[in-house]
Image (cartoon, grey):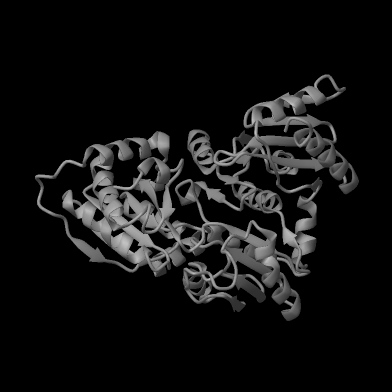
Amino acid sequence: MADLAKIIKAYDIRGVVPGELNESVAEAVGAAFVRLTGAGEVVTVHDMRTSSGPLAAAFGRGATSQGADVIDAGLGSTDMLYYASGTLGIPGAMVTASHNPSRYNGIKLCREGAKPVGQETGLTELREMIETGVPASAAPPGRTSRRDLLSGYAEHLKKLVDVSAIRPLKVVVDAGNGMAGYTVPKVFDGLPIDLVPMYFELDGTFPNHEANPIEPANLRDLQGVVTETGADIGLAFDGDADRCFVVDENGEIVSPSVLTALIATRELAREPGANVIHNLITSRAVPEIIAENGGLPVRTRVGHSFIKAEMARTSAIFGGEHSGHFYFRDFWFADSGMLAALHVLAALGHQEGPLSHLLARYARYAASGEVNSEVADQAAATARVRDAFAGRPGVTTDELDGLTVQAPDWRFNVRPSNTEPLLRLNVEAADTAAMESLRDEVLGIVRGAGA
């Protein structure tokens, strides 16, 4: 058996195929998952990687060996798994490594109703069960059946966002050879959209660029096609299509914080006073705009497990992250890049101006983006930053996630990576000059003597 401690991460299972993750491991995970959940039925979905189909089948064999029936939904996106789990009311598994290189694969798990499974909500117990040996079941083996969920998924999303009366739009979509190439045509079917597809061929080797739109280099092709074709908007999805990034008509990358503010405003228009989640890396404009629109901003740590837990606790209507994940109460508190895209298209299509004008009201501050520094002693570097800013007039600090330092017209956060010797810095200020000056000051402290 592979080293499970190496491949069972905070939120999912992920490793190199076949050395770390193979069919034997996937079968054991399927068996343990049924024992963990007590499920009589589970659903599986998988992405386009060559190893994904066989791994999903192996997971299914493990599940049926414990007496559970398996609904094999075949190809799909991660948010299609959430749709399946939510509508069917059963646990499920998505075989994908999202944006990771082609040599990787993984398994994302959820309980019935798309409730997340992480280290604190089942993954640790599942690992221990596999390591000690999953007990054989006395129940008769379950059965596997195929079911096409794509049409139902697409129709469900379009019931959650009113896109029926939008004006005609030219939309460029970069699927990155990932699952958006499979789901976008069905979701956009029947809408007044002139679709310009990029890299829709399903190919887990990612021959054009990494399916990771948080990296600006992976958006350059999309930016070029948007401006060359005179499109109204560009959309980019990651490999399993649960994250969405946007490019405006000028080819400019739109901050996920701006999208969070836009979608929050739309959701609050139909439910004034609702809670809206934002993590501490999103722009300070986000809680300002939430409050201005009658909502209650709720701040969380970075990471989808924290967001989902806080959304469920507060019954928040919506949540957004700087990483391009957007969460919806009406979608079982789960994230959906496609649902976020439909919100942006609806907002754009129900007015006549260009996207850049529509979004200008939501962009208030200059931001650095995430700047990484390799630091041997993260705690010592963070302490140097804390000491350097302590006692300055009007400055406050907190340590919800790393160190956040703020003043009336600027703020920054430094937090350690969970997996690498890196400190991640995000800076925001009233204008670009002030942001760059603050960024350089903090980086000088982080990277200074003893770093």
Q: Quadrant of the C terminus?
A: top right
Q: Height in image: 402 above or below 279?
A: above
At x 77%, y 47%, the residue is: 368
| Horizontal and vertical percent position of residue 166 | 64, 70
Picture quadrant where residue 132 is located? top left
| Horizontal and vertical percent position of residue 395 | 82, 25
| Number of numbered labels in the structure image | 0
| Horizontal and vertical percent position of residue 185 | 50, 75
Q: Residue furthest front?
A: 450
Q: Is residue 275 visible?
A: no
Residue closest to the eye, 148 or 191: 148
| Horizontal and vertical percent position of residue 136 | 14, 44
- Apparent side of residue 192 relative to residue 226 in the rendered image (left or right): left
At x 67%, y 49%, the residue is: 265
Residue closest to the eye, 302 or 442: 442
Residue closest to the eye, 439 or 161: 439
Q: Is residue 410 visible?
A: yes
At x 52%, y 56%, the residue is: 336
At x 39%, y 56%, the residue is: 94
Picture quadrant where residue 128 is located? top left
Q: Residue furthest right?
A: 433
- Apparent side of residue 266 relative to residue 69 in the rendered image (left or right): right
- Apparent side of residue 446 relative to residue 59 in the rendered image (left or right): right
Picture quadrant where residue 379 is located? top right
